[in-house]
Structure formats: C-alpha cells, structure tokens
C-alpha cells in the first residue's frame, strides 16, 4: 500500500509535505494559491493486475475502500459505508448507464470526499472542522464528524433543501444559515476560522475531498469492465468530482489498468440560473467570472465562482468534452421522465445530467450507440421540498 509521497500544487507544481495538515499551496508565487493533489509512489503496484490490488475480499462492505491501495495509508478509517454505488443500465437507452450516488450515506456523492477528509482530520488530530456548503457537503461533514468525534461548523444558504438543515442539526453540527450563497458562506468561514481554531474543509482548499471523489473514476471504469465510457456527464458546482475522476484516469493509466489514449469526453452540466463554467467554456476563457443572482432548484449547482474553474476548463477541453447549462424547466421535465419511465427519483442535479444527455443526443454531439455514464449525484428524496415546489405540488 503506498504512503503519500508528497502533495503537488496544481498551479506552480511545488511539492509539499503531507506530514502536517495542508490547505492550499503555501508557496504559490501569485494568488490564488493552487489546490494540492495527493501523489503516491505507485511503483510497487506497477505490473499488478487490478484483481491483485483492488480489495474484493469477502467479509464486510468495502465500498470505496476497495481502492485503499491508491488512497492514503492511514488508520482508523472513518466510514459509514460510502461508495461502490450501483451502475444502472437505462431501460430505454442501450448505451446509457446511471451511476446512482444517491445510495451513499447521507444520500449523495459528497460522502466519498468527506469520508476521506474526516479520516485525515482524525489522522492529523484535528478536532474542529468548518465548511461552507451548498447543502449536501454540510450533511456529509456533519455525519462523518459525528462518527469521528470532531466538531462540525456548517455554513449554508438559508434556502438549502430542508433535509440538509435537518440532517446537519440531527448529527449535532453547529449550523448557521446564511442569507446568501456558498460564496458568502465561504467568506464567513475564511474570516472566522483562525480565531475559532477551525480547519477549513472547503471544496479544493484541502487535498482529500478530491482524493475521496476520485474513487468515482476508479469505480466507473471497473464497473464497465476496466474500460472507459465514451462520455461522463457530471453535474458541476465546485467541480471536485470532475477533477477527482480525471486524476483517477491519470492513475489508472499509470498503473496500466486501462488503455491510454481514449479518455471519455467530460461533460460539465450546470443550470442556466448559475452557469459560470458553461459561460467560460463558451467564451473560450481559462477562468470563470462570478455569476450574479444565482438561482436554480438544483441547489448543489449554485456555486457562482468555483475555486477550481481553471482546472475544470482545462479538463473539459483536453477531453474533447463540453460544458452546458439547462433551464430548471428542462431539468424538471427530465426528472419526471426518469421517475416515470425508469423508476429512479433523481436529484435535480442528476436530472440536469439526464437532460444534458437528451440535448447532446439531439444535437448529434453524441450518438445513441455511445456508451455514457450519467451521474445522479444525490437521491431525489433529499429534495422533496424543492422538487415539490418546482412541480407546484402541495400536500392535498
Ligand atoms: C447533489 C449534488 N450534485 C452536484 C454537486 C456539485 O458538486 P461539485 O461541487 O463536486 O461540482 C453538488 C454540490 O453541492 C451536489 O450536492
Ligand atoms: Zn503552488
């Protein structure tokens, strides 16, 4: 099992020690400082088949920890049973697979990143964590922090899905509802963290949430028989999953577990009420511009200025992918379509991905024979209030 060799700055390439907790690159010559990638010495695994390395041993649920050989070698692991989620074949579209992340603890893919981040907080002996969140990362931090005996301080918009407020409160987190967006929450955490002694687990501002989310990349390739699909549709807010999956593809190729040269087109899906990445992609820009008056019932996509925008834009272009934005009406129509014809209650974010697939099939960007993975990043059950409102549905 490889220990962490070093942390590598995504911007200036500096190598930083993982012996002590790190946030952003401490030596970047110009702001904004780069996010840090976890790098391992994989040489001991080279030449091994995945069957020899991936932990499929019987006895207990391995979840995403089946990939422990390519995750930080620390104990104890804080787990609630995250990962190894179903890859469901669509009943209607032969090439379409839905990665059902709603099966995770706390009902979303955020569990993967926070399981690893909180495991590392335990490893470093950190006792207090804070997070600005669009809602689901807050729920996940609250759960894993409770399991680890760590304080969780959560800042999220007042109008998050009610489930996010209830779960975080039930897990015993200190919850602050903010009149604003995740960017306002981030400002509050940044202002208070030093005085309060909080470790900031904001998106990309510590190295391990990406590392947990990279397991989605390993999983989708394993579940498709160690082959890449033609495209991956990812509902994009802060972009941690997109960045994590691309890192997984780098590692899979280094390990020789998947053939080089045929990576999936990465499709970043946003809502037209908050689409900074799609706009920057369309304009050919390298960074996004803060989106004003962000609004959409796909609340996880309300990230007006993602910290990792430049990394994402580079990945999209390198992969031959695209970023696009769908209206709430189109997202809701796809949500209901999948509920009624596939028996799957998507989150609005997941429904943005299914709607984007329909769109790219209609435009000819993709063919019906293409094998694609659509991420349902969360369970529709976390959004009953927002989805009911979008459906104009009231309790009779
Ligand atoms: C259900 C859901 N999907 C997608 C996203 C966007 O995720 P990311 O920040 O990794 O782009 C979020 C973020 O809150 C979310 O909760
Ligand atoms: Zn740097």
Image: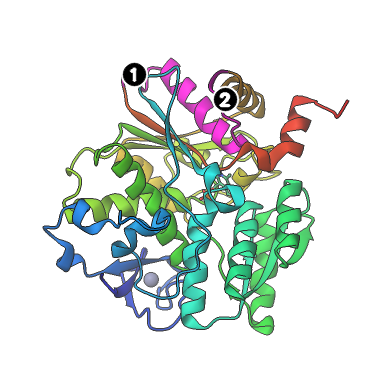
User: What residue does disc 1 label?
Assistant: 367
Q: Quadrant of residue 68?
A: bottom left
Q: Is residue 248 above or below residue 143?
A: above
Name the residue: 14% across, 60% down: 46
Farthest front residue in view:
59
> Which residues lie in the magenta part?
341-369
Residue 281 rendering spot, x and y as whole percentages: 45, 39
User: What residue does disc 2 label?
Assistant: 343
* Closer-to-camera residue (20/100): 100
Is tag 2's residue or tag 1's residue first in the polypeptide sequence? 2
Residue 41 rendering spot, x and y as whole percentages: 22, 70
Would the CB of label 1 be found within 8 Å of ligand 1?
Answer: no
Mark 1, Cα crowd under 10 Å, few <14 / some 14-19 / many 20+, is: some
Q: Is residue 36 above or below residue 83?
A: below
Which quadrant does ligand 2 occupy? bottom left
Q: State how far apart marks 2 and 1 are (Cα).
A: 24 Å
Secondary structure found at label 2: loop
């Amino acid at each position: 099992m490889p220990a962490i060799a070093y942390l590598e700055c995504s911007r200036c390439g500096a190598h930083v020690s993982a012996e002590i907790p790190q946030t952003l690159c401490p030596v970047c010559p110009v702001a904004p400082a780069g996010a840090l990638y976890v790098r391992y010495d994989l040489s001991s695994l080279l030449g091994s088949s995945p069957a020899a390395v991936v932990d499929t041993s019987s006895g207990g649920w391995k979840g995403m920890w089946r990939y422990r050989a390519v995750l930080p070698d620390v104990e104890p692991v804080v787990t609630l049973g995250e990962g190894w989620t179903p890859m469901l074949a669509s009943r209607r579209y032969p090439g379409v697979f839905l990665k059902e992340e709603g099966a995770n603890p706390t009902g979303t893919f955020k569990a993967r990143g926070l399981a690893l981040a909180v495991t590392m907080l335990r490893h470093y002996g950190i006792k207090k964590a804070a997070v600005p969140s669009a809602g689901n990362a807050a729920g996940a931090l609250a759960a894993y922090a409770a399991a680890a005996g760590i304080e969780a301080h959560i800042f999220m918009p007042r109008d998050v899905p009610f489930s996010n407020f209830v779960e975080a409160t039930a897990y015993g987190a200190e919850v602050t509802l903010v009149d604003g967006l995740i960017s306002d929450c981030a400002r509050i955490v940044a202002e208070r963290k030093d005085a309060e002694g909080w470790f900031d687990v904001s998106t990309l501002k510590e190295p391990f949430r990406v590392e947990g989310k990279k397991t989605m990349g390993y999983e989708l390739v394993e579940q498709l028989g160690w082959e890449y699909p033609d495209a991956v549709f990812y509902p994009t807010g802060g972009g941690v999953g997109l960045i994590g999956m691309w890192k997984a593809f780098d590692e899979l190729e280094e390990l020789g577990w998947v053939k080089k040269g045929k990576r999936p087109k990465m499709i970043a899906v946003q809502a037209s009420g908050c689409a900074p990445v799609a706009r920057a992609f369309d304009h050919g820009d390298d960074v996004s511009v803060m989106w004003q008056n962000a609004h959409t019932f796909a609340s996880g996509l309300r990230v007006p200025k993602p910290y990792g925008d430049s990394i994402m834009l580079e990945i999209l272009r390198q992969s031959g992918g695209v970023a696009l934005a769908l209206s709430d009406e189109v997202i809701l129509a796809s949500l209901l379509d999948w509920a009624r014809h596939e028996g799957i209650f998507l989150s609005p974010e997941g429904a943005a991905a299914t709607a984007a697939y329909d769109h790219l099939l209609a435009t000819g960007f993709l063919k019906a024979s293409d094998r694609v993975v659509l991420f349902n990043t969360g369970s529709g059950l976390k959004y009953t209030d927002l989805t009911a409102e979008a459906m104009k549905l009231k309790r009779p």
